[in-house]
Image (cartoon, grey):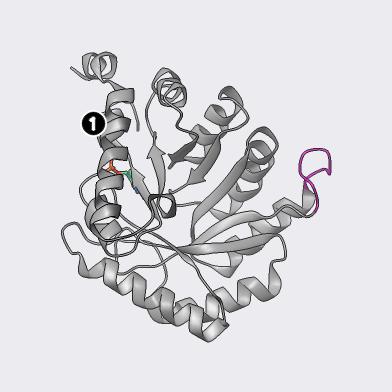
Amino acid sequence: MSSDATTTVDVADNLQYVRGKIQSTCEKVNRPVEDVRLVAVSKTKPLELLQQAYDANQRIFGENYAQELVEKAGQMPKDVQWHFIGSLQSNKANALVKSVVPVSAQLTVETVSSLKLANKLNNAMEALEEADCPKDKKLNIFIQINTSGEESKSGIEPSEAVSLCKEISDKCNRLFIQGLMTIGAPGDLGCFDTLIQCRDQVCSDLGLESLEVSMGMSGDFEAAIERGATNVRVGSTVFGARDYSNKN
Ligand SMILES: *Cc1c(COP(=O)(O)O)cnc(C)c1O
């Protein structure tokens, strides 16, 4: 059943549908559509489907597994921007940066939740050869916030966001804190409001003019946009349901 689902999914159609929803939701709440970035989450999906999305002008892809992202980045065109959205062990940070930054337009790590990981990413950027990455280029990161209070979810507590953002911006010259990210509890839109409040707090305490918010997936990206999301991560609505039976 899964291979049939893969061959019959119409990625271009699905993308058009999602883009249409983003547009109509932005119009509804009076936001410019350019304010919302669509990350097409292609984890577990074969390259053919990513290529179909690329052919339909999608350039921003999201992946959850470091090794899978490294492999795909090596095979997709160099103007793709990759968002890493899975949990990243510190010891994989260097390999991710080293293999993806030189062969892509941009790597963004959306799931930074410790100074330790930030330092590893920063060191990995510094270790890149000038030919692979100009010395003034930064790695984009989002700080992952646990807005649902569930122990199973990664991310720092909202109350820890100000201090972690401050430490990272003081100590990690090669990282740019682009925003805050959350997954939230399914169906609990209050998590999105929590992330917005957290963003406002970080902006005012650190004197920042703006900071992005990454929230919203297939089931709730419209609600997230209504609440102010600037980055939505949509997987199954673009690429079809995922089949994990081949993963261990
Ligand atoms: C898989 C995943 C998504 C996409 O989920 P869908 O429900 O398939 O859109 C978004 N964000 C994160 C962090 C994910 O792991």
Quadrant of the displayed image that contains ligand 1: top left
- Callout 1 amino acid: Ala
As drawn, is 110 to the left or to the right of 157? right
Percent x, y for residue 60? Answer: 48, 39
Rendered residue at 50%/34% (across/down): 59
Q: Is residue 133 magenta?
A: yes
As drawn, is 110 to the left or to the right of 3? right
Percent x, y for residue 176? Answer: 62, 62
Q: How many marks?
A: 1
Element under label 1? Answer: loop
Rendered residue at 28%/65% (across/down): 227
Q: Is residue 150 visible?
A: no
Range covered by the magenta-colored residues:
128-135
As drawn, is 214 to the left or to the right of 92? left
Judging depth in this view, the residue of 145 and 209 nearest the camera is: 209
Percent x, y for residue 9? Answer: 26, 20
**Looking at the picture, does residue 178 appear above or below residue 95?**
below
How packed mark 1 is, by other alpha carbons closer than 10 Å (few <14, some 14-19, many 20 or more), is some
Judging depth in this view, the residue of 68 and 131 nearest the camera is: 131
Instruction: Report the quarter where the C terminus lies.
Output: top left
Quadrant of residue 164 in the image?
bottom right
Q: Is residue 163 visible?
A: yes
The residue wearing badge 1 is: 241
**Looking at the picture, does residue 96 appear above or below residue 90?**
above
Rendered residue at 29%/48% (across/down): 217
Q: Is residue 236 magenta?
A: no
Quadrant of residue 218 in the image?
top left
Instruction: Report the quarter where the N terminus lies.
Output: top left
Judging depth in this view, the residue of 187 and 91 nearest the camera is: 187
Q: Residue furthest right?
A: 130
Rendered residue at 42%/74% (across/down): 199
Specify the principal SS of the magenta part. Answer: loop
